[in-house]
Amino acid sequence: MPQLGMGELLIILIIVLLLFGASRITGVASALGGSIKAFRKAVRDDDVPASKSEPAESTDKKVETNV
């Protein structure tokens, strides 16, 4: 498979810019950045152990003995 050099990538970038326009490309890039940020936040929130995010229940139970 042939590799793309800097010249070919620049030509492809210019063609994409002409087809879609600068404002549409910046809008897509902004939406992509927001999606990545939301994904990272969701992954970070899932990594928090349940014991830290929820209040711990008291394990002190009164034990009644019938004597």
Image (tube, grey):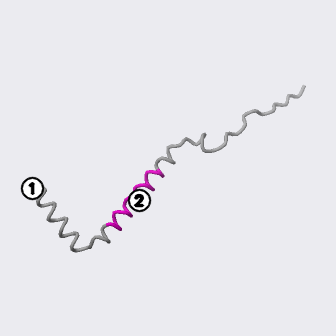
- Expressed as whole percent of the image width and height from the top left, the position of residue 50 reads 58, 43
Q: Is residue 27 on the magenta stretch? A: yes
Magenta-tinted stretch? 26-42
Q: Are marks 1 and 2 in contact (CB under 8 Å)?
A: no
Note whether 61 is above or below 18 in the view shown. above
Disc 2 crowd rating (10 Å Cα; few below 14, some 14-19, many 20+) is: few
Residue 2's tag is 1
Locate the C terminus by quadrant.
top right
Question: Mark 2: which amino acid?
Answer: Ser
Q: Determine which of the numbered discs, if any, sits on residue 26 in the image.
A: none
Viewer-side label of 1, 2: 2
Q: Secondary structure at mark 1?
A: loop
Q: Residue at x 41, y 59 (%)?
A: 35
Residue tagged 2: 35
Task: Classify 29 as above or below 48.
Answer: below
For the N terminus, which image quadrant? bottom left
Q: Residue at x 63, y 44 (%)?
A: 54
Q: Is residue 61 above or below residue 30?
A: above
Residue found at x 35% / y 68%? 27
Give the SS element for disc 2.
helix
Where is residue 59 drawn, in percent x and y?
Answer: 72, 34
Q: Quadrant of residue 17?
A: bottom left
Residue at the limit of the structure toward the top, as seen here: 67
User: How far across and how far down the image is residue 42, in percent?
Assistant: 48, 52
In depth, the one of 49 and 61 nearer the eye is 49
